[in-house]
Amino acid sequence: MIMNRNTIYIFLVLILMSLPSCSWLDVGSKSEVGFEEMFSTREGFYTTLSGIYISMGGEDLYGKNLSLYALEPLTQQYTVSENETDRTKWVQFQYATDTGEKTISAIWGTMYNTIVNCNVLIEQLRKPDLPVFERGVPDVMLAEALALRAYMYFDLVRMFNDAWCVNPASANVPFKTDFGFVIGNKVSTEELLNNLIADLSSAQASLTKYDPIVADVGYNDKYMAYDRTQRMNYYAVTALMARIEMYRQNYREAYRLAMLVVDSNKFRFINPEEIVETDLYGKELKVDRVFMPEMVFGLYTETVLATSRTTYEGLSQDFVKSDNCYDADDVRRNWIYTNPSANNKINLIKYQRSRLTEDASKYKPSVVPMLKLGEMYLLAAECALKDKTTGGNATTLLNRMKSERRTAEMAPNASDDKIQSEITHEYICEFKGEGQLLYYYKRNDMSAIDDGRYNGNVVVMKRENYRFPLPKYEEDFGYGSSK
């Protein structure tokens, strides 16, 4: 079961309650709408898909837990307040506290509810008697729904299953493709990832024809007016496929897919002068600390702003332990701030922005990076290192990225061990505040990780540290037990 019977939501109620009452998303005051009525017009499809994005951007998922609050502290890159006993235990991989169990239950339950929403939309979009849409729009929407479902399933795998390199038969994540109350079939990581790649291949094929980010098409449809980098676009699907293929050690295919994104020239590394522009007195005029030109898929969510303010930008909560991993001129130093008001502790200010309404124009959209150019370079470099038949050069790829980051490049004759060490270094530097570093450590089954000060000291990791326990209600009902 997804959660106990008293807290299961019918999908449409969940969607409608989560939507803001504004613009064309406003569906009125009804809290329950039948399927036939909901999907009798294009508005129902728009509302449902937009609601999925909104749910993903909420605090249970990528607006808080899966970007900043839950995953980031586990990387050991931060100190946490000693006044938060449960959170201190969480950082030590003690998940069985009240706060820990609530966090894990929220992630699991909201993820599966949102997956169910995807399942409903996918079924409806596959029906032959759709409302009249502009040609290609239903294909794009179906591709996005398939890809968003795959994105969430893969993160469930990365959180709740053993690492692929340890046990590809691990089966803690049930696979559900309908919208009933039964949670779905218990399948291995291997089988589940095969299904995800099949769905993503289908999505990629449709988007090749109909996504304006890659195809020579134009639309009048209002859904297609969204910035495609804030939707699960063709290159985002390709990047997610690269991430999954890398996870299951299919290095040649992962390299090919990552380079499709790199070589598309649709995305570029940010120029230093674009990050923060100030006047003569140092007042900020334009700010882009999330590096929008690099965003293959950035999930729009203002929830991350509140999470950042309360947990990382204050005087007493989570602080970056050290800036030692960054060279002096590294542009990513714009993500951190040595705060004299907090005894020179280091705040993470990646998402920081003024609360004043009149300052809103200074900032790019409030997004959480979900897939970005830097990851594709690092994936391609690691694939080239681990499989020489890819035809890629790991050092060249790393140095191209390092040059853009304004950091010291590697010697062209660097050893394989040195190259892998530098890839790890770049992951530590590149993914602050994004919830991705722990996944890198787990994928490589690292038994010791940097302790956050980048001075050679490490934290010893047990394999069970990398795997979240199932929510208690799932264990009680016997679902998802490992094979």
Image (cartoon, grey):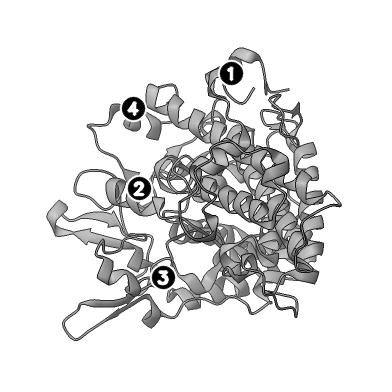
Residue bearing the label numbered 1: 5
Label pair 4/1, CB-CB below 8 angstroms: no
Give the residue number, with chain letter if any, for mark 4.
86
Residue 341 at what x, y percent from top left? 13, 55
Percent across and percent down for residue 98 are 39, 22
> Disc 4 versus disc 1: distance between alpha carbons?
28 Å
Q: Which dot marks residue 307? A: 2
Q: Nearer the viewer, residue 229 or 77?
A: 229
- The local secondary structure at tag 1 comes to helix
Which mark sits nearer the N-terminus, 3 or 1? 1
Q: Residues within 10 Å of mark 2 (few under 14, many from 20)?
A: some
Q: Residues within 10 Å of mark 4 (few under 14, many from 20)?
A: some
Q: Amino acid at mark 1?
A: Arg
Front position among marks 3 and 1: 1
Relative to 39, is 75 on the left or the right? left
The residue at 36%/61% (across/down) is 350
Label 3–label 1 contact, CB within 8 A: no
Q: Say which of marks 4 and 1 sits in front.
A: 1
Mark in the foreground, 2 or 4: 2
Picture layout, residue 366 above or below residue 404? above
Marks 4, 3: nearer the viewer: 3
